[in-house]
Amino acid sequence: MQLIDTHVHINFDVFEADLDAVRQRWRDTGVISLIHSCVHPGEFPSIQNLSRRFPEMFFAVGLHPLDAEKWTANSKEQIFDLCSSDPKVVAIGEMGLDFYKAENHQQQEEIFIAQLEIARKLEKPVIIHCRDAASRMRELMQDFWANSGSVSGVMHCWGGNPEETQWFLDLGFYISLSGIVTFKNAIAIQESAKMIPQDRLLIETDCPFLAPVPKRGKRNEPAFVHYVAEFVANLRGVSLETIANTTTRNACQLFSLPVVANTSVNHS
């Protein structure tokens, strides 16, 4: 069985002491590839070094909405140049809107649009963070699609209800489920998980955050994506192998991962 964790942050200090052991666990669990997200361009060197250390790791470059104050007049050019500088950069992000923790809505929206423009120009997918902002996110994306053209991507660590899920499916996006889907009170997310088309489903850990049941409350790590896959398989009434094959194939498709990451994926 092969799995791809489509959203990790293993450059954080909490992994510094035992990262080699963490890697061994993800390999033992069948994780053949990871997509490392980026919260601001200043992380680029550390993430790039990790991608060289771990050939199975690919990564993104972007600015998280909660780091909007770090956006400068040069940020757009910087992200563009960094994304163009390394073939292991497979996406722009993470980017988006977070109206739950911050009130600088206009600033976030402007930065979001700027990063969509980069993705459109470079023909890269985007990794989108969206919290308490689904309606406005949909409006901005619809306007951008109409005026500039569509962009591919994923709604990461998705927490929306089925209606909101359908909005982003209609825009052509993939939906990525994290450990939140395993939480007892995550009823709306579980209902969304049942309705996502097979060819648009992804899984992730968003580690070190949001460890899935039965590891909830502990530091999350890529190996735990297995628990997300297992829960989603049970929820959708299919085998774990089916979810593994499906989500691995989808990740390779969205992020244009090279053959080394998917040579033995079962496409049946």
Image: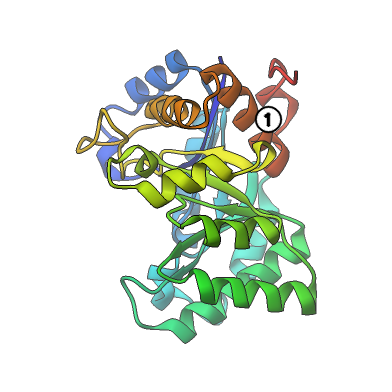
Q: Position of residue 38 (x, y in %)?
A: 48, 54
Q: Is residue 76 left or right of residue 72?
A: right
Q: Is residue 189 left or right of residue 140?
A: left
Quarter of the rendering occupied by the N terminus:
top right
x 44%, y 82%: residue: 105
Q: Is residue 167 left or right of residue 13?
A: right
The correct choice, above or below, for 57 with respect to 159 in the image is above
Q: Find the residue positioned furthest to the left.
A: 217
Q: Position of residue 151 (x, y in %)?
A: 72, 61
Name which quarter of the figure residue 123 lies in. bottom right
Q: Position of residue 206 (x, y in %)?
A: 40, 44
Q: Which residue is mark 1?
A: 249
x 65%, y 72%: residue: 141
- Within 10 Å of the Cα at label 1, are there few (<14), some (14-19), or many (20+) other Cα atoms? many
The correct choice, above or below, for 245 with respect to 64 in the image is above
Q: Nearer the viewer, residue 34 or 17?
A: 34
Quarter of the rendering occupied by the C terminus:
top right
Name which quarter of the figure residue 208 lies in. top left
Task: Report the amino acid beneath label 1.
Answer: Arg
